[in-house]
Image: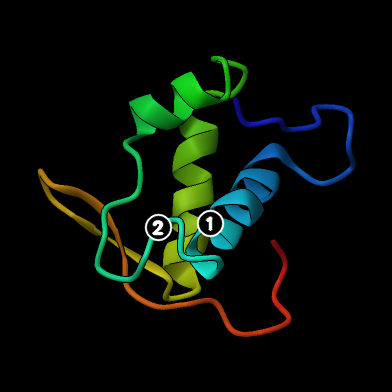
Amino acid sequence: MMSLDRDAMTPLYVQLANVLRERIRNGEVPVGRRLPSQAELEEETGGTVSRRTIKSALELLADEGLVQGVQGKGVFVMALPPAGTNG
């Protein structure tokens, strides 16, 4: 189960984006592969974060050019994070 700190000063969506970014960086989710669905991520966090929080984390990664959503298929890894980025 993914562990996020609700009491941290860092917002939950940023914490989640950091976890996903690290999974991309270490090859757990390679370029071209689909990230877990929002429902799968919600389950992985034990239901402690909302779908909106998950969507915000994915939007942050999309803004960084790391992932891209494909209608009806999911969110796919498009690039590796640059060295030195959070996560």
Tell me the quarter of the image containing the C terminus: bottom right
Q: Position of residue 38 (x, y in %)?
A: 37, 33
* Residue in the image at 80% along x and 27% along y: 6
Q: Are marks 2 and 1 in contact (CB under 8 Å)?
A: yes
Residue 11 in percent (x, y) is at 75, 42
Q: What colour scheme does the image use?
A: rainbow
Measure the alpha-carbon separation of dots 2 and 1.
Answer: 6 Å
Q: What residue lies at 46% left-to-right and 65% top-to-bottom?
A: 27
Task: Determine which quarter of the picture holds residue 65.
Answer: bottom left
Mark seen at residue 15: none
Q: Position of residue 60 (x, y in %)?
A: 52, 59
* Residue type, mark 2 in image: Val
Using the image, tell me which numbered label, if any, was put on residue 23. Answer: 1
Image position of 64 (left or right of 78): right
Rendered residue at 40%/57% (across/down)? 29
Kindly identify which residue carries mark 2.
29
Quarter of the image for the N terminus: give it. top right
